[in-house]
């Protein structure tokens, strides 16, 4: 596998077909405060592309935006809700249609409450990934090798996870329910941005 780092946009002509795995790294968890530093992409064929944004970036990234907004390209995320909000807020595009491996995991792995990426990759694929760089400073002028590897590994396995999760959703008769949840996810992210972050609007009280 090879990891490519790009500045401010994805070069043209990359990742030309199929579903695309997407992840983001930000300065923190409060989207309007914590700027988008990195967008990671993979087509599941062994190469990962990292697009880095500098402090003060105008996020003028036409190739990346076109890819993320392409209605014919499914975007695979792990915890799509956060990434969709960050992408919408900083890049101004809604990254749909969506598949979320965390949501799929919650719908089929009802025997556990452990739905983190590391846990999923270990159980479903038998691969160990490190989460050591998760809370590192993504805003610095240079990304360390460990940060690059970590960022790339967050998109590297999403296609394989999706295939296994789809088999289990099918087996348990929950594919339609999962799809309905994926279709709602962009709206859930927009609710986060619009001021209903931790409110369940379907709750009784
Ligand atoms: Mn990540």
Image (tube, helix red, strand yellow):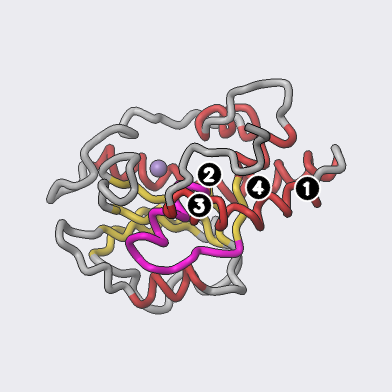
173 part of magenta stretch: no
CB atoms at circles 4 and 1 under 8 Å apart? no
Sequence-wise first label, 4 or 3:
4
Per the image, label 2 sits on a secondary structure element best described as loop
In this view, the residue farthest toward the top is: 112
Sequence-wise first label, 3 or 1:
1
Q: Residues within 10 Å of mark 4 (few under 14, many from 20)?
A: many
Q: Residues within 10 Å of mark 3 (few under 14, many from 20)?
A: some
Q: Which residue bears the numbered disc 3?
A: 191
State the quadrant of the C terminus.
top right
Q: Which residues are magenta?
A: 81-97
Q: Is residue 181 above or below residue 68?
A: above
Q: Residues within 10 Å of mark 1 (few under 14, many from 20)?
A: few
Q: Nearer the viewer, mark 3 or mark 2?
A: 3
Tell me the residue at 71%/42% (across/down).
Answer: 164
CB atoms at circles 2 and 4 under 8 Å apart? no
């Amino acid at each position: 596998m090879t990891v490519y780092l790009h500045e401010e946009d994805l070069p043209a002509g990359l990742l030309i077909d199929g579903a695309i795995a997407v992840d983001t790294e930000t300065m923190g968890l409060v989207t309007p405060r914590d700027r988008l530093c990195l967008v990671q992409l993979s087509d599941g064929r062994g190469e990962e592309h990292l697009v880095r944004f500098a402090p003060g970036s105008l996020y003028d990234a036409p190739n990346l935006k076109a890819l993320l907004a392409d209605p014919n390209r499914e975007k695979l995320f792990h915890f799509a809700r956060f990434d969709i909000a960050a992408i919408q807020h900083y890049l101004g595009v809604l990254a749909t249609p969506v598949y979320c491996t965390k949501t799929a995991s919650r719908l089929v792995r009802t025997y556990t409450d452990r739905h983190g990426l590391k846990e999923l990759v270990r159980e479903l694929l038998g691969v160990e990934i490190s989460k050591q760089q998760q809370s590192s400073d993504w805003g610095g002028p240079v990304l360390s090798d460990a940060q690059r590897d970590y960022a790339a590994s967050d998109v590297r396995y999403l296609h394989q996870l999706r295939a296994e999760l789809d088999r289990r959703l099918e087996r348990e008769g929950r594919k339609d329910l999962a799809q309905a949840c994926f279709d709602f996810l962009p709206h859930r992210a927009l609710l986060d941005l619009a001021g209903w972050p931790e409110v369940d609007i379907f709750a009784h009280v």
